[in-house]
Image (spheres, helix red, strand yellow):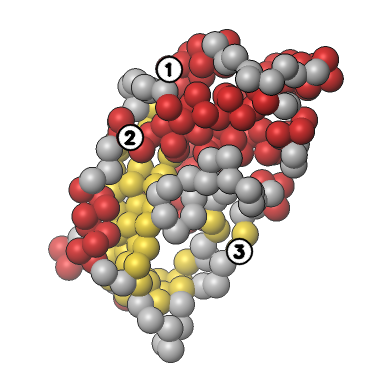
């Protein structure tokens, strides 16, 4: 993709990721995954990492901007992985670069995993706290605090964009991480089996959890 001085991209924001890398685990206001992705205003990318060297925007980022992480997972190289993208934007390049430098698999991946798992529960029920009881709350907490292994930072990229001529330009940084599906599912199941709800869950909540577990990763 040459000469991207006037590249227009229709941005779709995937559910897990806002303008910062910090997921809203157990937040009071949760997005409805059935309504995603949300079409955002078209913007112009007038600069990006490596543009001055004639490099192109990587395919994984273009697919992410169009279809979220599912777009990346459609790539042959990631067909056996789950991928996660952290993003952050602002006008201060140095501050964003500092955020990038301080990104840590050990500290940040558990929150990325928790966000995606929480979203899967939200897809099954708009009120997971009610549908699945305290088990859901304790599971997300456990996932957030777990020491996940075998996750890796794959790539990072930044773009400089402007919604229109009158809007202030901003930088947006993206960090791509991945873990094999086999490893992720194995670790998730261990965490799931070791959840100890603080409040007893009802028979109906137990049945709802069992139904979801049977096909949890089909829509993950």
Q: Which residue is mark 1?
A: 183
Q: Which residue is mark 3?
A: 39
Toward the right, the furthest residue is: 204
Q: Residue at x 38, y 34 (%)?
A: 109
Q: Residue at x 54, y 36 (%)?
A: 116
Q: Earlier in the sequence, mark 1 or mark 3?
A: 3
Q: Residue at x 76, y 33 (%)?
A: 130
Nearest to the observer: residue 47 or residue 56? 47
Determine whether, in the image, residue 90 is placed left or right of residue 27: left
Q: What is the x, y in percent for residue 88?
A: 37, 57
Q: Secondary structure at mark 3?
A: strand
Nearest to the observer: residue 28 or residue 39? 28
Determine whether, in the image, residue 173 is placed left or right of residue 130: left
Label 3 environment density (alpha carbons within 10 Å; few <14, some 14–19, many ≥20):
few
Q: Is residue 182 above or below residue 51?
A: above
- Rendered image quadrant of residue 108: top left
Q: Residue at x 46, y 16 (%)?
A: 187
Gap between marks 1 and 3 measured at Cα: 33 Å
- Res. 107 mark: 2
Q: Secondary structure at mark 2?
A: helix
Toward the front, the furthest residue is: 199
């Amino acid at each position: 993709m040459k000469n991207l001085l006037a590249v227009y991209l229709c941005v779709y924001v995937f559910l897990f990721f806002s303008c910062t890398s910090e997921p809203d685990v157990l937040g009071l206001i949760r997005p409805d995954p059935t309504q995603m992705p949300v079409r955002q205003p078209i913007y112009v990318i007038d600069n990006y990492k490596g543009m001055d060297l004639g490099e192109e925007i990587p395919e994984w980022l273009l697919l992410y901007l169009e279809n979220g992480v599912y777009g990346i997972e459609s790539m042959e190289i990631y067909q056996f992985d789950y991928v996660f993208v952290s993003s952050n934007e602002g006008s201060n390049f140095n501050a964003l670069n500092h955020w990038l430098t301080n990104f840590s698999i050990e500290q940040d991946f558990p929150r990325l995993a928790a966000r995606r798992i929480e979203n899967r529960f939200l897809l099954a029920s708009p009120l997971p706290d009610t549908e699945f009881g305290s088990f859901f709350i304790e599971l997300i907490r456990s996932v957030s605090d777990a020491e996940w292994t075998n996750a890796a930072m794959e790539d990072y990229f930044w773009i400089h964009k402007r919604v229109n001529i009158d809007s202030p330009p901003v930088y947006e940084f993206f960090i791509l991480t991945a873990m094999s599906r086999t490893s992720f599912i194995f670790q998730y199941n261990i965490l799931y089996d070791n959840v100890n709800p603080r409040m007893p869950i009802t028979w109906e909540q137990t049945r709802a959890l069992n139904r979801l577990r049977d096909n949890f990763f089909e829509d993950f």
